[in-house]
Amino acid sequence: MNLVSPTKVKVVRSLVELREVIRGWRREGQTVGLVPTMGALHEGHLALVRMARAKCDRAVASIFVNPTQFAPNEDFASYPRDEAGDLEKLAGVNCDLAWIPDVTEMYPPGFATEIVPKGAALGLEADHRPHFFTGVATVCTKLFGQVTPDIAVFGEKDYQQLCVIRQVVRDLNLPLEIVGHPTVREPDGLAMSSRNAYMTAEERSQAPLIYQTLVKAAREIADGSPIAAVAGRGRETLTAAGFRVDYFEVRDAETLSVVDDVAKRPLRVLAAAWLGKTRLIDNVAVE
Ligand code: PAF
């Protein structure tokens, strides 16, 4: 069964139809890769779809702006939405199916279950967005149950999210593999993000400093500088340039636990900071 015309991606909005399509693929022995997204797709997302397509016979991208991962004061209402543009981009990378449930398909009346991750979900983002990982873990667990993929591909830009999803899949014995994809960056180093569109031209020109500061910190740690001093300098650099820093931290790259031994590996340097009304997050590995 060929579901893709050369220029169009198949759009599915009901779970009944989604299951039927996936069953058809499974009957033919095909493997399925899922890329969960909230739409407003950019090159970073498309790289994830290409990876899913390279590793599996079929690639599914979900587009669902998940209300449960936004706090009431956050940008759920204004989050960028461009379904027509997204579908064109997905067709361009040979995505087989776009799974676009509405809120009642995802959270029907009576919905009353949450996945509340701890471990890697504690601290960092959670200190500033306490609701976030419960919303993400719950919706991703649902997406895994709906699409039943062999793999799901997540970007390393949201590094804590990637660690949390790996933890949920491991802890709940979910039958899929989580694949991380390196962060896709603009030519000046800024990590691609749907929220970059919120920045003014001046903020956009300052924004790459977050990546530059992370790279410098990772190099200093690799050279043996004490972790607390490096993190402190990172916070100072960004604050002096006008960022409001939520965190700038060095953590164990697998568990995200706090480390003070500079020789420990693998390590990751992670930061979140505001430029005006835009919250940027980024991270780099310590080599
Ligand atoms: O990273 C995102 O876009 C979202 O957090 C995700 C994984 C699609 C869950 O809503």
Image: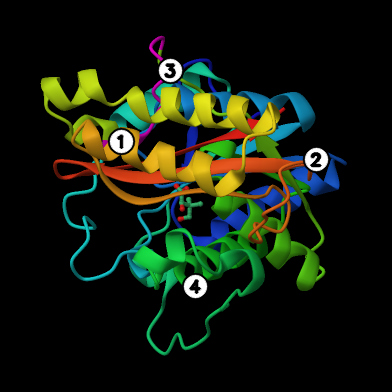
Counting from the top left corner in percent of width and height, residue 155 is at 57, 37
Q: In this view, does 79 lie to the left or right of 138?
A: left
- The crowding category of the residue bearing disc 2, from other C-alpha atoms within 10 Å (few below 14, some 14 to 19, many at least 20), is some
Q: Which of marks 3 and 2 is in front?
A: 3
The amino acid pointed to by label 2 is Thr
Q: Residue at the right extreme?
A: 29
Q: Distance between the residues labelled 3 and 4?
A: 30 Å
Sequence-wise, the earlier of marks 3 and 2 is 2
The amino acid pointed to by label 1 is Leu
Instruction: State the residue position of label 1.
Output: 238
Instruction: State the residue position of label 3.
Output: 189
Q: In this view, does 31 lie to the left or right of 103?
A: right
Asked if 216 appears above or below 258 in the picture, the reply is: above
The amino acid pointed to by label 3 is Gly
Instruction: State the residue position of label 2.
Output: 31
Residue in the foreground of this view, choosing between 126 and 184 = 126
Asked if 121 appears above or below 115 in the picture, the reply is: above
- The crowding category of the residue bearing disc 4, from other C-alpha atoms within 10 Å (few below 14, some 14 to 19, many at least 20), is many
What numbered label is drawn on residue 134?
4
